[in-house]
Amino acid sequence: MYSLKLWHVTVLSAFIISACNQEEKELPAASKPVEVKLAEPFRFHKAVEVKPGLTLDVVSWGRGSESVGAYLILRSDSTHLKYKSISGELDGEIVDVWNMDMDADGDPELYIQAKGEGEGSHLSMYVYEFNNSGSARQITFPNLSGKSKKGYKGGDSVYIKDDVLMREFPVTNDEDKNNPTTEKKILKYQLRNNSFSVDEVKQETDTAAKKK
């Protein structure tokens, strides 16, 4: 346990030092934020303010590969002066990070969205729920079922609609190799008791829509 804490402190110190070494730049006249390139081995950083005094900093890093690495979640409770961290292996690169309370139990969840590279740019989701004491529970994001996975080649779009996590991606039917067809599949994820349920959203065909 002591060596793990020392490792986290070492990684965080390296990140702070690399950030301090970046030259300060004034915002341009258009007030556009300047994208700061992180020094290796860091690739991504985003601070998510859960509430005043409670911030989750998400960092990813790794040397020698762009498709695998690791992530680190730094929980800063400046109100109660409590600081904790969580780390895990990362498949792909982080696209975005956000928090919400999808199951409305009062404990916020942190969502880390990542994608792979190339044609197999599959979606990877890392989800953690934090309670008031700062303890975290990882919630398993379900893999695609055999039916949903058929024709899947990545290219996911993820968004929130009516407090539900929606996922869209193209699927290709290449049974006829001379004339493959591509359709869109939509999945709806709901969270209850720290477990996700998945439902496919049925879409109207052009023929059915014309009959109305």
Image (cartoon, rainbow, N blue to C red):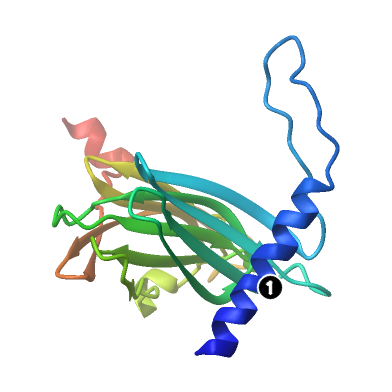
Q: Is residue 60 above or below residue 16?
A: below
Q: Could you classify mark 1 by the number of other residues whose Cα lies within 10 Å: few (under 14), some (14-19), or many (20 or more)?
A: few
Residue under the image location 37 percent in, 44 percent down: 53
User: In the image, what residue occupies the spot 73% across and 36% down?
Assistant: 35
Q: Is residue 103 above or below residue 50?
A: below
Q: Is residue 41 rendered to the left or right of residue 47? A: right
Total labels: the figure holds 1
Residue 55 position within the rendered picture, expressed as x and y whole percent measured from the top left: 43, 49
Task: Give the left or right position of residue 178, taking residue 181 as reference.
Answer: right
Image quarter of residue 27: top right
Q: As rendered, which of 94 and 25 lies closer to the eye?
A: 25
Residue that numbered label 1 is attached to: 10
Question: Which sits in the foreground, 2 or 179?
Answer: 2
Q: Which quarter shows the C terminus? A: top left
The answer to whether one can see residue 16 in this image is yes
Q: Nearer the viewer, residue 120 or 110?
A: 110
Inspect this view and state whether residue 117 appears. Answer: no
Residue 45 percent location from the top left of the image: 62, 52
Q: Is residue 82 rendered to the left or right of residue 200?
A: right
Residue 152 lies, in percent from the top left, at 51, 67
Residue projecting furthest to the top: 29
Query: Where, by quadrant of the figure, is residue 115 drawn?
Result: bottom right
Q: Name the residue at 66% across, 54% down.
A: 44
Identified at 16% across, 54% down, the residue is 106
